[in-house]
Image (spheres, grey):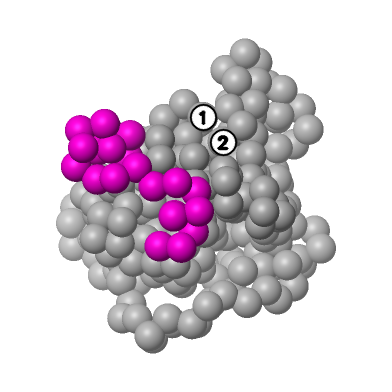
Amino acid sequence: LRLPPVIKNNAVISESTNKKTDDDEDYIVGQFCPYCSYNDESFCIDRVEYLKQRYRLSEEDAKNDKLVLSRCKSPPHDVYEDEPILVLHAGPHKTGTTALQAFIYDLIYANETIFPRDNLRIPSYDELPGVFAKEGVGLNLPHCSLEDYKNSGGQMNSPMCARMRKAFPQFMRDAYNKSENALIVAEDFDRAAINFRRLRFFLQPYHRIKVVVTYRRLHDWLPSFYNQIIDHYSLIYAAGEEQYPSFVEWLDA
């Protein structure tokens, strides 16, 4: 059983009875940070594993190593008002989200410093990798947050999200450490199968999370959604495998 998210102090909060997974590491300010960068080649969790194997240390002793302590504590922000903000533009579909994505990433590809000048970080493909590239980079986050990945209607299975599970937490913590605001735009956050516990893990350590949703009047939205469905199934209709429905027939179906 998964309960829907609620908004509290501008943060997305969810409750779940799902079993704890590797994606669900708790994040505590000032404590050991698994996916903080120990150096250019590894994360803190990698360094701890190395120390355990190389010097036969316990996990506690490895985490208390002086260099690990100096580099691997989670960021010190503990007053929400002083923290950077994460903005999630969640669509939904047919509300201009794709045009916004194209506008943002066209600007980035033309001038990668344009958003950092305003203290705003937007993930690149290397920072949020997956099957979606170019202006669709943000879609990799909701598709890796679906409960059963492809079985929940997504485009990625769990192994395909492996790179993202490493790279994206590092991006988030790097931006947070530098007190940078972050923006992620993806219309597929509207999917019912989103695992909010996993999504909350990916969004750590940000607490100030603002969700932007666009409203489009139903009488304007329905024809647009209908046209997209017809376009999606155009080959099936052309082959005569299904009858091409009129807008009225589609509404009545």
Query: Could you tell me the amino acid type at mark 1?
Result: Glu
The image quadrant that residue 2 belongs to is: bottom left
Left or right: residue 245 versus residue 115 is left
Q: Is residue 196 above or below residue 130?
A: below
Q: Are marks 2 and 1 in contact (CB under 8 Å)?
A: yes
Dot label at residue 98: 2
> Can the viewer see residue 32 in this picture?
no
User: Is residue 204 rendered magenta in the image?
Assistant: no
- Label 1: which residue? 135
Query: Comparing marks 2 and 1, which lies closer to the viewer?
Result: 2
Q: What is the residue that sits farthest to the top in this orientation?
A: 110
Q: Which corner quadrant holds the C terminus?
A: bottom left
Residue displayed at 44% across by 67% down: 192
* Residue at x 37%, y 61% (from the top left corner): 146
Badge 2 element:
helix
Of the two numbered discs 2 and 1 on the same chain, state the one appearing first in sequence: 2
Q: Is 9 displayed left or right of 50 in the figure?
A: right
- In the image, the segment drawn in magenta is 233-253
Q: Residue at x 61, y 69 (%)?
A: 12
Quarter of the image with the N terminus is bottom left
- Is 132 positioned to the left or the right of 203 in the image? left
